[in-house]
Image (cartoon, grey):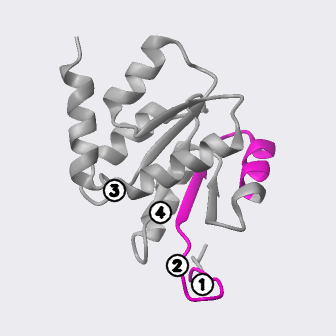
Amino acid sequence: MEIEPEPTPPGGDRRFRVLLVDDNIELLEAVRFALLDDYFIETATSAEDALERIEQLAQGELPDCMVVDVKMPGLNGVQLVRILRGDPTTAQIPLIILSAYVQGEDILRGQLAGVDRYLAKPFDLEVLIDAIQQATRMTPEQRLVRLRSFLDDP
């Protein structure tokens, strides 16, 4: 599949590219439709599919942010986050987990893997939009300080 150039809205402002990763196609389409006016949206139905899309995008432009489900067949979302954080090419992509798994240990596992935000399903669209906006504004240095704070907390 060839990646098309990102459309530029009127006024020339660049829209952020967001990659949504979830095996629930209905949820993917609903979120894609809700965000389409403000973001250039790519979708993937598995972690493996997301890695393939990122490899294709690396030829041009990586996502500005990724929203990832945890429970998927094959690699899960936390494993995907670890892979992305471990690769210098993708380590700085802002990552948001959107999951029904919201126990303390689930959230901590995501944070230790390197997510920028961990949001619970079902979710409020405005909360997701705010998380995407915050994640795309965070500098690599701020992301590192945030991750270190999780490691330092007892």
The amino acid type found where label 1 is placed reads Thr
Query: Above or below — where is 102 with respect to 121?
Result: above
Can the viewer see residue 86? no
Q: Few, some or many C-alpha atoms within 10 Å of disc 2 (few <14, some 14-19, many ≥20)?
A: some
Q: Does the magenta stretch include residue 6?
A: yes
Q: Which amino acid does label 4 sit on?
A: Pro
Q: Is mark 1 on a helix, strand or loop?
A: loop
Q: What residue type is labelled 3?
A: Thr
Please tell me which residue is depicted at 72% across the width and 29% down the height of the picture: 122
Looking at the rendering, the stretch of residues picked out in magenta corresponds to 5-32
Report the residue marked by disc 4: 63
In the image, which disc is placed on residue 113?
A: none
Q: How crowded is mark 1: few (under 14 residues within 10 Å), some or many (20 or more)?
A: few
Residue at image point 47% right, 18% down: 106
Q: Name the residue under label 2.
A: 14
* Horizontal relation, residue 104 to residue 37: left or right: left
Q: Which disc number belongs to residue 90?
A: 3
Q: Do the residues labelled 1 and 4 touch (CB within 8 Å)?
A: no
Q: Quadrant of residue 92?
A: bottom left
- Residue denoted by label 1: 8
Q: Label 3's element?
A: loop
Q: What residue type is labelled 2?
A: Arg
Between the C-alphas of marks 2 and 4, the distance is 13 Å
The reply to whether the C-beta atoms of the residues labelled 1 and 2 are less than 8 Å apart is: yes
Mark 1 or mark 2: name the one nearer the start of the chain: 1
Which comes before the other along the chain, label 3 or label 2?
Answer: 2
